[in-house]
Image (tube, grey):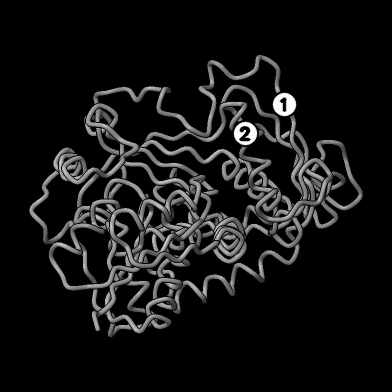
Amino acid sequence: MKEKVILAYSGGLDTSIIVPWLKENYDFEVIAVCLDVGQGDSMEEVKAKAIKTGASKVYIEDLKEEFITEYLYKGIKCGAVYEGKYLLGTAFARPSMAKRLVEIAHLEGSKYICHGCTGKGNDQVRFEVGIASFDPTIKIIAPWRIWDIQSREEAIDYAEARGIDLNVTKEKIYSRDQNLWHISHEGGDLEDPKNEHSSELYMMVTPPEKAPDVAEYVEIYFEKGIPLKVNGVELKPIELLDTLNKIAGKNGVGIIDIVENRLVGMKSRGVYETPGGTLLYAAHGELERLTLDKQTYHYKEMIAQKYGELLYDGLWFTTLRESIDAFVDVTQQTVTGTVKLKLYKGNVKCAFIDTPNALYSEEISSFSTGTMFDHKDSAGFINLYSLPSKIKAMTFNK
């Protein structure tokens, strides 16, 4: 009886050629696992393609809602961003995928999991660390690290020689990853930072210059940091994100172009579209400004940066990430309310915030005299606050 290998299969260029490559180089039964996190592909077509190219069995796994509620919502509550710009669309998807691959490997009695990540990328780390977190005995097969194919052009040649249908060409050779949260574009002419990226590559977002000439408003309601309503209508997680993707995308919101520091030691350039996610981060951040005290808000900003690094580096299944989640959940107890955003040609502006938990007091903060604030109190405060500076001046400015 042949041993089985579990292949994380998307039907894209890399995994499409891995099926025949595995059969040509190993005596394995190839079981393809299609992990649906909202790629927008027809899973039946992907399944048929896997069978056609040599897979003996195909699993279609719907992870979309779990992806949002168990991963994206944690990121929104934390405010996790990588290097100030990237909303971690690819990184958020990998932990749930790695977990399910192990579960299917156990179900099938397989000792091997194969993926199509290159040796230059972050995803190889995310998948393999995730897999090891559940079963360190599973062996990894990573064809890009061992085969003779050296480029995407050669991969296309390999596929064409075996009659495999592709959705890329040597002219349009971008490497893309899409899910409910975002779509990334890498490779091709983007590899030269001197090249301005073309808006023709956008798939979720209208180019800002072509967006409507009239601003659009959108209201998002959060309860303890979790988005529940759009424009007053309660929506389920997938429907909510899909709605915001359409609203933001129509208005040119959610595009970044970044040269990022990869985990493996090199810099890479990518163009990311994260329309709905951009709105959720913006609205959630504005609500926190009104509902968190200064010390908690500032400390949480540091935590968010670390969380983003952990996620980017494939360290989701760690005690530190779980501990940060526990801290964040405490901070979110008061993050309830509605935020209205104004969208116009790629720009996002906060129009109003309505929350029962606001720590802002107009009576105290107003330039008009209020009963709860005495201007005279500031003099004593400043005297004490400036004491270290006064002592230093007296000591060294003699």
Q: Which mark is residue 216?
A: 1
Residue at (48, 48) in percent of width and height: 39
Q: CA distance from mark 2 to mark 1?
A: 9 Å
Residue at (55, 48) in percent of width and height: 180
Image height of 374 relative to 29, above or below: above
Asked whether 303 or 235 is in front, the reply is 235
Disc 1 crowd rating (10 Å Cα; few below 14, some 14-19, many 20+) is some
Image coords of residue 54 (percent x, y): 28, 59
Dot 1 amino acid type: Glu
Image coords of residue 201 (percent x, y): 40, 28
Residue at (11, 61) in percent of width and height: 146
The image quadrant of residue 213 is top right
Image height of 252 relative to 34, above or below: above
Task: Give the total of numbered labels.
Answer: 2
Disc 2 crowd rating (10 Å Cα; few below 14, some 14-19, many 20+) is many
Residue under pointer 2: 248
Residue 248 located left or right of residue 4: right
Asked whether 302 or 152 is in front, the reply is 152
Asked whether 15 or 135 is in front, the reply is 15
Residue 7 located left or right of residue 357: left
The image quadrant of residue 292 is bottom right
